[in-house]
Image: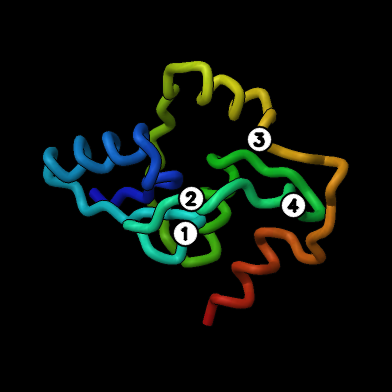
Amino acid sequence: MNILITGSTGPLGQELVRIAQSAGHSVRIGSRFSRPEASPQGRAPNFGGPNIARVGEMAETWMEAMGRDRYMVRLLIPGTTAQAFRKGRNTDPARKEGTITWRQWLDRLSP
């Protein structure tokens, strides 16, 4: 199975990559760093787009835009950080500085 793991340079993401690869899956990683081996260089200023989307919604939109018809397994990741993500605490609705949506950006990539 092909799997996309976002946040794969953090401790949880690295463990998910290891588990998926050891189970024989093909893993693609998503990272805010230009190189997966890079590390954070400090806190960047908050930045937001014109809308807020959950990771699952973004993954579904990506698969649709890329013409992928695959089943997506939803996992409930335990822990306080994952819980904060589910509650939207990683977003900043007051800083809508982006000018295009996730889907519009993906449409630019599609042939």
Dividing the picture into quadrants, the one containing residue 92 is: top right
Three-letter amino acid code of the residue under disc 4: Phe
Q: Nearer the viewer, mark 1 or mark 2?
A: 2
State which tag comes first along the sequence, 2 or 3: 2
Q: Nearer the viewer, mark 2 or mark 3?
A: 2
State which tag comes first along the sequence, 3 or 4: 4
What crowding class fits label 4: few (fewer than 14 Cα within 10 Å), some (14-19), or many (20 or more)? Answer: few
The residue labelled by disc 3 is: 90
The residue labelled by disc 2 is: 40
Three-letter amino acid code of the residue under disc 3: Asn
Q: CA distance from mark 3 to mark 1?
A: 17 Å
Q: Position of residue 26 (x, y in %)?
A: 21, 53
State which tag comes first along the sequence, 4 or 2: 2
Q: Position of residue 64 (x, y in %)?
A: 53, 59
Residue at 51% in and 25% down: 82
Three-letter amino acid code of the residue under disc 2: Pro
Check if mark 1's residue and mark 2's residue have beta carbons within 8 Å.
yes
Q: Nearer the viewer, mark 3 or mark 1?
A: 1
Q: Is residue 82 left or right of residue 35?
A: right
State which tag comes first along the sequence, 1 or 4: 1
The residue labelled by disc 1 is: 33
Three-letter amino acid code of the residue under disc 1: Phe
Q: CA distance from mark 4 to mark 2?
A: 16 Å
| Front one among 2 and 7 | 7
